[in-house]
């Protein structure tokens, strides 16, 4: 199946690092994505990683992929108040273009 | 570049009524998606178009939901008749193609409340 699981809530102090976790069940070759959703807005793609990679870094964002445990994480360094949002991890695999989203992690940044 | 436009932003209807949502994708984007996002959940794909053809509508409740993309540009999503459990945000997204690593751009969504 394509189930994607996420924990629900994280609070973090401004300037600290945030880590958001996600597990998935489908081990087929796939792309895995992190999206950000601010209140009243659509989803914004933050970054993605292909399943033959272990890590991807993009400015303040670091994505780690543990294929053995089917675990994906997003680390945000130097978290800012503008990072307060809901973060969704999503997965899709070859032959099936459907994006399966997790329930999302709400991140609240405390000034 | 203009983003994905959706209207209306909000809609409140009574159960058993009909409702339609409209989406104008980014110019030149061949792929268009409609997602349903129920409060507290991640978005669920309802239907995906490639130009004016349907690629995937396996999760669309076809007894009450319908969608079309005439001329391969704008799209409408209709619910007839609406049920209470249809209350959700309906998101439209578009991408240049349906390749795996092509970014999908999302509109702000239409928040539907069925009472």
Image (tube, rainbow, N blue to C red):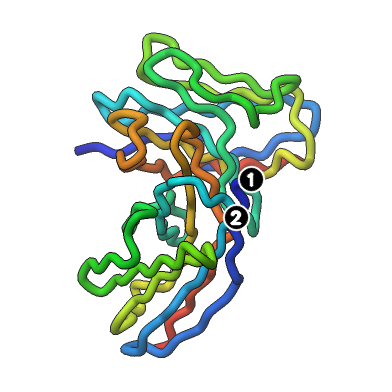
Asked if A23 appears above or below A18 in the picture, the reply is above
The N terminus of chain A sits in image quarter: top right
Q: Nearer the viewer, residue A44 or A47?
A: A47
Asked if B59 appears above or below A5 in the picture, the reply is above
Residue B67 placement, left or right of B18 = left
Classify mark 2: helix, strand or loop. loop
Label 1 crowd (10 A; few <14 / some 14-19 / many >=20): few
Which residue shows up at 70% across the image and 21% down it? B62
Which residue shows up at 32% across the image and 59% down it? A53
* Residue B7 in sight: no
Which residue shows up at 45% across the image and 16% down it? B69
Classify mark 1: helix, strand or loop. loop
> Badge 2 is on which residue?
A25
The residue sitting at the front extreme is A68
Percent x, y for residue A104? 55, 62
Q: Determine if marks 1 and 2 fall on one subunit.
A: yes
Do callouts 1 and 2 mark residues in contact (Cβ within 8 Å)? yes
Asked if A9 appears above or below A37 in the picture, the reply is below
Tell me the chain of label 1. A
**The quadrant where residue A38 appears:** bottom left
Tell me the chain of label 2. A
> Badge 1 is on which residue?
A1
| Cα gap from disc 1 to disc 2, whole angstroms | 6 Å
The C terminus of chain A sits in image quarter: bottom left
Residue B59 placement, left or right of A50 = right
Q: Which of marks 1 and 2 is nearer the N terminus?
A: 1
Percent x, y for residue A71? 51, 66
* Residue B102 in sight: yes
Percent x, y for residue A7? 60, 71
């Amino acid at each position: 199946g394509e189930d994607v699981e996420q924990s629900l809530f994280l609070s973090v102090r401004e300037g600290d690092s945030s880590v958001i976790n996600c597990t998935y069940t489908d081990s087929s070759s796939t792309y895995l994505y992190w999206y950000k959703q601010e209140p009243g807005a659509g989803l914004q793609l933050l970054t993605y990683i292909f399943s033959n990679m272990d890590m991807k870094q993009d400015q303040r964002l670091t994505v780690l992929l543990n294929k053995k445990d089917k675990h994906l994480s997003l680390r945000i360094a130097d978290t800012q108040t503008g990072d307060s949002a809901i973060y969704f991890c999503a997965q899709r695999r070859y032959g099936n273009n459907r994006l399966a989203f997790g329930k999302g992690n709400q991140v609240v940044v405390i000034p | 570049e203009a983003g994905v436009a959706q209207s209306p932003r909000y809609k409140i209807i009574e159960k058993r009524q009909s409702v339609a949502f409209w989406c104008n994708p980014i110019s030149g984007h061949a792929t268009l998606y409609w997602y349903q996002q129920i409060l507290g959940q991640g978005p669920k794909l309802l239907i995906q178009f490639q130009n004016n053809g349907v690629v995937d509508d396996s999760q669309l409740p076809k007894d009450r939901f319908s969608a079309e993309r005439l001329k391969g540009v704008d799209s409408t999503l209709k619910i007839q008749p609406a049920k209470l459990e249809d209350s959700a945000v309906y998101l439209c997204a578009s991408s240049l193609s349906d390749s795996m690593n092509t970014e999908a751009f999302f509109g702000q969504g239409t928040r539907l409340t069925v009472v």
